[in-house]
Amino acid sequence: MTIYTPPPEHPDLSADDPGLLDAVAAGQARLTPEQGLAALRTLPLHELGRAADARCRTLHGDDLRTYVIDRNINYTNVCTARCTFCAFRRDADDHDAYTLDKQAIYDKIAELVAIGGTQILMQGGMNPALPLEWYVDLLSGIRSRFPGVHVHAFSPPEFIEFVQFFDPPGDTLEAKLRWVMVRLRDAGLDSVPGGGGEIFAHHVRRKIGLGKCDAEAWLTTMYVAHTLGMFTSATMMFGHIEGLADRVHHMWLVRRWQDRALGTPSLRDGTAAERQSPPVGHYKAFISWPFQRENTPLGRVPDFGARDEDFAAPGRLGEFAGDVLADLNGTIRGENALSSEQVLERVPSFGRRVRMSSATDYLRTQALSRLFLDNIYSIGASWVTTGPHVGQVAMAFGANDMGSVMMEENVVSSAGTTYCLDEAVLCRLIRDAGFTPAQRNNTYDIIRVHAATPDAPDLAVKDWSAHRARRMHQQAPPAPKAAKAALTVGATK
């Protein structure tokens, strides 16, 4: 049995030590959370990018950078959660609430297959009206009609609600999750996406993700998937009310649970099954993206710094409330001495101001994820939220993957982001960044390399001034302007 051994930490070194950064890039050292936070806060942008790019080249080489042709299918927008950052979810009796019938989903997959797609990413709201049999029948139908399509579906918050809705047998959450997941896997589920990660720190999560599962439940869901041999992804949505330490804590939890999935002895629980063989599955990728504010309740919160009272924390003038409270262990700073309520009373602006992420803040965060998550293979660039050219620059800041050719997207586009790229544009972005574009599948195996030949998708375009990607399909029309202010939101991602 092969046991994974993570690289050693060197807590005595500073985050800007060139030897430490070189060792991390080579896979010979790992950053401590304290070093990660220091790097995120203080390392010059170009140095952080250089180190992240070096780490990426160690893992992925100097040539190929990948993308996938898939389709996001949001099968329902009915959701029990009330997340304040989302403009997608609806109540069942809303005029634009929907649940797709199975034939509509099959038709969408057929359109994907017709353009050479290999995967669907299927997620929805958490809809209590759908029984387990609906999901089993849907997955079985997809498998029988499209045996070559990989089904990447149902994020951890959905699985936690499946446990609530279906009341499966089992004495523990893990056992109940396994009961549900085995049935969906046997029906046709191939892997689990990392939606609903947001920020793991409890004091942030309870403010922005009302009705959504906590970090422990999210991570447990993924671990169950790993023990069943499934590959998954992990995500983080930042640039709202969280502190920088909350971002690092989020990455640290992903890294620890990945260590466990890969078989690190000190992190395994010692059950007989775990001692016999480590799980096959694990996190394949980490993708982070900035919060998109339009049409969301959280987006109506004022920006940090817009008012003098934002700087109201005693003795911490000029600091963002999220940073005042954030601790690397995921709790509220000083919580051991004071109750959460007392701490929040001292920082009244927490949750009432947002600190939106800039392009450079996004690049810094992504670069840190490449360096800190030394046990995760792929880091994805989030061009869907940051725009295609920031996504292109992200390939110099540790990203090896440009994500999906988007046929359809409903969640982020509901919050005002509607970037749309076809395969030719995506390949051109990769090539213009100095790499060779390559189509991949869900497990990051290369399907097709587009060398610099006339038949490559980007090089086959004769007139870029006339080339336009077809508008991305959106399942539900935007709400009327008069209704936008009343939206409550919270679908999984």
Image (cartoon, rainbow, N blue to C red):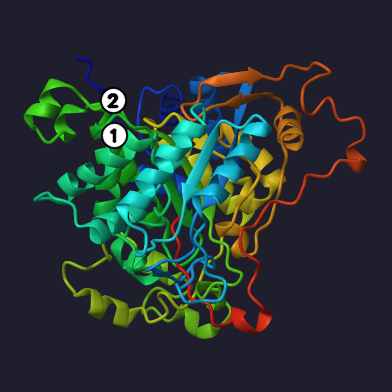
Residues at discs 2 and 1 in contact (Cβ within 8 Å): yes
Pick the residue in front: 147 or 478.
147
Indicate the position of residue 21 as horizontal and vertical percent values.
45, 31
Pick the residue in front: 7 or 72.
72
Pick the residue in front: 387 or 189.
189
Check disc 2 and report the residue beneath it.
Answer: 280
Type of residue at label 2?
Val
Q: Residue at x 65, y 59 (%)?
A: 417
Query: Which numbered disc covers residue 83?
Result: none
Disc 1 is placed on an element classified as: helix
| Mark closest to the chain's N terminus, 2 or 1 | 1
Relative horizontal placement of residue 378, taking residue 264 as reference (left or right): right
Indicate the position of residue 378 as horizontal and vertical percent values.
48, 32
- Label 2, residues with CA under 10 Å away: few <14, some 14-19, many ≥20: some
Q: Count every numbered label the image shows and give the total.
A: 2
Dividing the picture into quarters, in which one does residue 71 lie? top right
Type of residue at label 1?
His
Dividing the picture into quarters, in which one does residue 185 lie? top left
Q: Which residue is drawn at 30% across and 29% down?
A: 229
Camera sees residue 400: yes
Query: Which numbered disc covers residue 226?
Result: 1
